[in-house]
Amino acid sequence: MKKHSNQIDMLHGPLAGKIVRFALPLALASILQQLFNSADLAVVGRFDSSTAMAAVGSNAALINLLVSLFSGLSLGTNVVIASLIGRGEKEKISDAVHTSVLTAFLSGCIVLTLGEIIAPNLLLLMSTPDEVLPLATLYLRIYFLTMPFLLLYDFGSSILRARGDSTRPLIVLIISGLVNIVLNIVFVAGFGMGVAGVATATVISNAISAVLVMSFLVRDTGLFHLSFRKLKIHGQILKKVIAIGAPAGLQGMVFSLSNVVIQSGINSFGADCIAGNTAAQNFEFMCYFIINGFSQATTTFTSQNFAAGKKKRCDQILRICLVIGLLSTLALSTVFYLGKGAFILIFTTDDAVKHYAYIRLLCIGMLELLTGTYEMPGGSMRGMGDSLTPAIITMLGSCVFRLVWIWTVFRAFHSIEVLLVVYPISWVICGVAMNIARARRRRLAYALVKETD
């Protein structure tokens, strides 16, 4: 297979440097994307009102819920193509590329259609405050127009990452994000469009992302070349993508469902609490994206090496990702907490909003590294072809536990601190269970693979 300058050889040589080179662009891409999303909040918070800020923030959990099922399929694309590379099955890569792109577009259209139909009812189910509901509905309806573009970017980026290219997706996000910021200012500060302005800017910037990533594949002259005339869903490829991606998507969807319920609890404390939690979430998300970057590195590197029979390297991959990922996340969390006064000031000057933001940063932000104790072992299991077990553990340990907590403990002790502390407790439960499951999966899987190191 022809090597590209932006392609990483995951099967040979030292691992640490290559993992960092792969994971950091992923983490930076997600952090930049969050920064650009934060620009939505900052612009409406500064140039409109805290109600508009709450309207944007109250949609976050709901959007993730509806998108997660389909976005999870992109992980299946990553694992399938990485495994084809590891096994040297070059002739099937083109089928996987064209199947993935068409699946992304059709899935995006489905999410768009469903979202436009049920958006207002979903916001009502989340107990969105009456003063926030009209703006939240307007934002959500416009935002759903971006779904086909968003999923085309996700799947296209997964195709690029499967061969070790995590740099160009980062460049794409930088470009589209800068466009988003400029349009936010123009639409909101210049034209006074409020939440409609930030939503419209998001649609345009995501369309740019999709076009750029698809252009990389169209211009590729090798096995990853995309030809629109060859777009076709190949049944066997799709089955493999679904086998890996559907459990991950279901996990994300159920995970988001628990967050929707938690958001309903946050909504019960009023608009100031919604706005404060929304502001603080931006910083905890950035910390999580470091974990997610190394988790995706774990999956992709393990997929190639496990398919090639390199078992020792699979163990090394997990150890390296855990050490670097957890320490990096702790460092960033500490920076955000120690500088919380200045960071939250980016979004608001309202003392009540800042009060709730500080609570969330302490209860969740400082403990974000705990998510790595289950994300990376889960990523290792997915790389070995088992996506169902991590999904079940996450759904039970995080989602079901959180729902039970809200319906029992939070109902008995109705405070924002009691509501938020469910996050770190659930992370510990998931981490213990996931590491036990990964050890068992390792023994079973390694027994069936001949070592080639």
Image: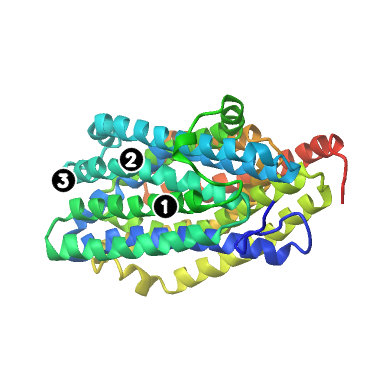
| N-term mark: 1 or 3 | 3
What's the distance in space between the residues labelled 3 and 2, CA to CA?
A: 15 Å
Q: What is the spatial separation of the Cα atoms under label 1 and label 3, in whole angstroms?
A: 24 Å
What amino acid type should be assigned to the residue bearing mark 3? Answer: Glu
Residue 161 left/right relative to 301: left
The residue beneath circle 1 is: 417
Between marks 1 and 2 in the image, the one whose residue lies nearer the viewer: 2
Horizontal and vertical percent for residue 134?
16, 42
Q: Say which residue appears at 63% left-offset and 59% top-offset.
A: 7
Q: How far from the left and from the top, in percent, is residue 292? A: 56, 53
User: Does residue 129 appear to the left or right of 110 in the view shown?
Assistant: left
122 relative to 324, above or below = above
Q: Residue furthest top?
A: 235
Check disc 3 and report the residue beneath it.
131
Residue depicted at x 31% and y 70%: 346
User: Quick one: label 3 or label 2, which is nearer the N terminus?
Assistant: 3
Residue 428 vertical position relative to residue 169 in the rendered view, above or below: above
Q: Which residue is mark 2?
A: 264
How is the protein colored in the picture? rainbow
Asked which secondary structure carries label 3, the reply is loop
Q: Quadrant of residue 212?
A: bottom left
Is disc 2 placed on a helix, strand or loop?
helix
